[in-house]
Image (tube, rainbow, N blue to C red):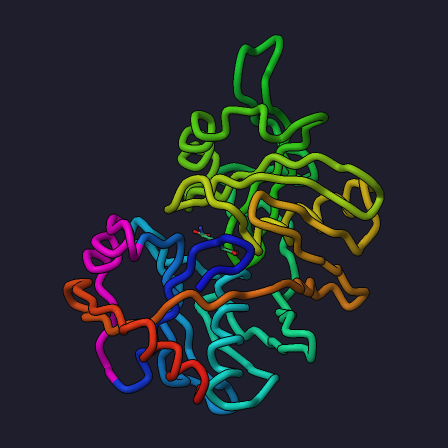
């Protein structure tokens, strides 16, 4: 599936106690057909009252606490299977509520942002995380500097720029910033331009992945950081290379992300090895029709 071009493998693990091994994930990520940004592995619920436990695996085999675009894909898959529209998932970062709307778009309550340096986490104390001391490029003329940092369950840094976000070499700066010692758990790194009090344009270098066409939690991170620094209001349209998400930072502090999800093809997967067999197009289409 994909969520705004964020490439997602949704894997149904509800009938097995197995886990997808990191080696299997890396093999799948390296394959031209199965290349992905995140695997969303749907496991049986661990907590009463939840619909599933979802493990999120990055292309490098590491685990993430949150993935907004992938969560919308899981909702669409389970809504097609069950005819239900509302779901509660458990992830490493806690519980997520999600809902499919009549128009097919999906909203996910991504929880509350956390701003303290220990929560992001940062390696040293910063009292004000709206802009921390961190820069790239020459000391007297940095190319990027003073990012806002926030945890959406996972760590994010957002650099504010004026002008075309596409003109920055995020492919070069991304790995340096992702692995900068200030981020003991690494970080997802975005550059964002404010285009109006209710819109942003951004690109993201994802932790454990690289450049992606969209990142839901990064869109949330940029939206709350923009509102927190009075660059925008609390509801913004966030445009990334793969599409646009609407982010609302509600008065109760929860961040709600709304956007599309798209099914592409299905198959069968060996979670130990990453070997897979793609369904014949007709078969997968039929499966889709009957949910
Ligand atoms: N694509 C995801 C984010 C994955 C985050 C992951 N790269 C990490 O935190 O390690 C999203 O839509 O939110």
**What stretch of residues is rendered in magenta?**
16-34
- Tell how many labels: 0
Q: Is residue 132 left or right of residue 273?
A: right
- The single residue placed furthest to the top in the displayed view is 140
Residue 25's place in the image compared with 52, above or below, is above
Which residue sits at x=51%, y=46%?
213
**On screen, residue 233 above or below 56:** above
Magenta region includes residue 36: no
Nearest the camera: 253 or 174? 174
Q: Which residue is drawn at 25% across and 68% down?
A: 278
Q: Residue 289: x, y in percent? A: 45, 84
> Front-most of 92 and 219?
219
Q: In the image, is residue 138 above or below residue 80?
A: above
Between residue 289 and residue 145, name the one nearer to us.
289
Residue 222 drawn at (x, y percent)? 66, 46
In percent of width and height, residue 257 lies at 66, 62
Quadrant of the drawing holding the N terminus: bottom left
Residue 80, percent from left and from top: 50, 83
Q: Which residue is drawn at 24% across and 52% down?
A: 26
């Amino acid at each position: 599936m994909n969520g705004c071009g964020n490439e997602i493998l949704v894997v149904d693990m509800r009938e097995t106690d197995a886990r997808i091994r990191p080696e299997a994930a890396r093999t799948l990520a390296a394959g031209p057909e199965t290349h992905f940004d995140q695997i969303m592995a749907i496991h049986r619920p661990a907590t009463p009252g939840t619909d599933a436990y979802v493990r999120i695996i990055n292309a490098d085999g590491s685990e993430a606490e949150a993935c907004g675009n992938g969560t919308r894909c899981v909702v669409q898959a389970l809504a097609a299977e069950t005819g239900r529209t509302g779901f509660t998932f458990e992830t490493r970062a806690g519980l997520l509520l999600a809902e499919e709307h009549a128009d097919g778009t999906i909203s996910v309550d991504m929880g509350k942002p956390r701003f303290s340096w220990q929560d992001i986490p940062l390696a040293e104390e910063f009292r004000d995380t709206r802009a921390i001391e961190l820069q790239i490029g020459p000391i007297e003329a940095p190319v990027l500097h003073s990012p806002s940092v926030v945890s959406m369950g996972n760590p994010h840094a957002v650099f504010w720029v004026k002008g075309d976000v596409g003109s920055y070499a995020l492919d070069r700066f991304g790995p340096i910033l992702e692995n900068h010692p200030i981020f003991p758990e690494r970080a997802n790194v975005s550059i964002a331009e404010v285009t109006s009090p209710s819109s942003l344009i951004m690109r993201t270098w994802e932790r454990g992945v690289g450049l992606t066409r969209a990142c839901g939690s990064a869109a949330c991170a940029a939206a709350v950081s923009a509102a927190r620094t009075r660059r925008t209001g609390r509801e913004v349209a966030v445009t990334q290379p793969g599409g646009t998400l609407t982010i609302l930072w509600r008065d109760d502090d929860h961040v709600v992300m709304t956007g599309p999800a798209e099914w592409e093809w299905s198959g069968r997967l060996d979670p130990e090895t990453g070997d897979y067999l793609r369904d014949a197009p007709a078969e997968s289409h039929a499966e889709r029709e009957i949910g």
